[in-house]
Amino acid sequence: MQRTLIADALETENPREDITLCGWVRTRRDLAGCSFIEIHDGSSLVGMQCVVDHAGLAHAALDAVSTGAALQVRGALVPSPGKGQRWEVQTREIDVFGPADPQSYPLQKKRHSDEFLRGIAHLRARTNKYGAAFRLRSQAAFAIHDFFRNRRFVLVHTPVLTGADCEGAGEMFGVNTPAGFFHRPCHLTVSGQLEAEALAMGLGRVYTFGPAFRAENSNTARHAAEFWMIEPEMAFADLHDIMELGEALIRHVIEYVLAHCPDDLRLFDAYVDKGLVDRLAGMIVRPFARVPYAEAVRILKASGKIFIHPVVFGTDMQTEHERFLAEEHFCRPVIVYDYPREIKAFYMRANDDNETVAAMDILAPRVGELVGGSQREERLDRLLARLAELGQNPDDYWWYLDLRRFGSAPHAGFGLGFERLLMLLTGISNIRDVLPFPRTPGSLEF
Ligand code: 4AD
Ligand code: MG
């Protein structure tokens, strides 16, 4: 049996005498001896209208055709007289795989709230908005792989289980192991960076694309306990190189989805975030802004804006500060660099002023921090001194320090939060709605 995807049927050039489609019923209307059944199979935002002449069809099959039922439809693909659609199916046969009781099927024709749909995450993919979000997620992932492969980056897979909080990026989840299994405590990784660095010091250019786990109990719209991160690491590169790389990556993904996901983006533009498409297109015409941290603090202080968190030199920027810079001051993504060393991780390369490190964050409108990265400290003496300052035991970092003992070289990398990027691309304002099954405090149902 040859089944056609609706996305392919919609792009057909000529009418077809015989076509078989499958999908879930979105709507059914009955009119003067005819039924109009719209089915969706997930391959496209637009569904297929199936017209059923009651005279030609056994009524038993039609009885089970209600919103949510899964069907197979066979008939002829013909030009549609209806507006807004090129083709429709003149239906000869309907087989119902699985009915859906109209009394209890939770997805009604009306628009449901995001909160309600989070409670039925197992059915969300059947709605226009979440179907679009998850298709776009897939396209964006391919765009990212595309980008790195074209630049000869090697995709590497770093471990999810880790034995040390080398990174200090956030609170970790513990993993229960049989007694003595690893001879040390085991956690879920917060970042693959340290391993990526080791691989870059042999493969030159690498990137990871995998899950990261952070147990901060921050119930915000931008933090998930499990999220996906893209972490490129480049040998023989400095801070400037990864600023270029991060900006080029974001621009590439924006261009890619503008070209490959026009229907899904139109939906977000119409129902989620008015003006989204123009704003995305605008983001790729001008270079991102770049500003040192000290200058960013001056801008924030001079803004006259009342922030919930006061702006203090030498403290980490809050989302409200990041958003002000990107949305109101620069009106485009902005790269902030040269952060005070005290607020940044031990592995970031010290600048000559001894006050700042060669770190950079890319801040985006509506999203805030999208990327965090740095040039890494490649000088063994500097790194040892920093660990000592922080009261860390260098033995815990023996292999990381080895990379500085044998063939050390300047290198740099960053982490891009995939969900934050998807929030930028879709206009969806809560991270829970770009993850199929979000893990956040109190949420582990699905
Ligand atoms: O800035 P972060 O903590 O950087 C690192 O983890 C470095 N090791 C990356 C590197 O240099 N290889 O995290 C990187 C990005 C953030 O900019 C943000 O986009 C995202 O990861 N992120 C989160 N996304 C969703 N939920 C969370 N809880 C996140 N924490 C960080
Ligand atoms: Mg960060």
Image: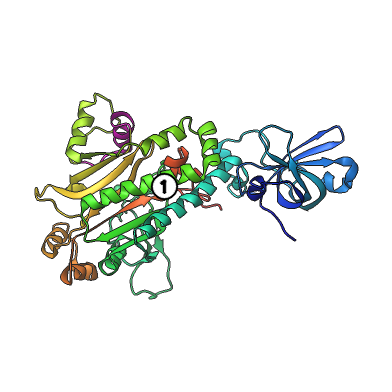
State whether residue 36 is above or below residue 394: above
Residue 257 visible in the picture: yes
| Residue 69 screen position, x and y as percent | 74, 47
Overall secondary structure of the magenta stretch?
Answer: helix
x 32%, y 31%: residue: 331
| Residue 250 screen position, x and y as percent | 37, 46
Disc 1: which residue: 253
For the N terminus, the image quarter is: bottom right
Residue 312 visible in the picture: no
Image-based side of 32 in relation to 225, left or right: right
Q: Label 1 amino acid? A: Val
| Residue 160 screen position, x and y as percent | 40, 64
Q: Farthest residue in the left direction?
A: 353
**Mark 1, residues whose alpha carbon is within 10 Å: few (<14), some, or many (≥20)?**
many
| Residue 275 screen position, x and y as percent | 46, 30
The front one of 363 and 91 is 91
Magenta span of residues: 315-331
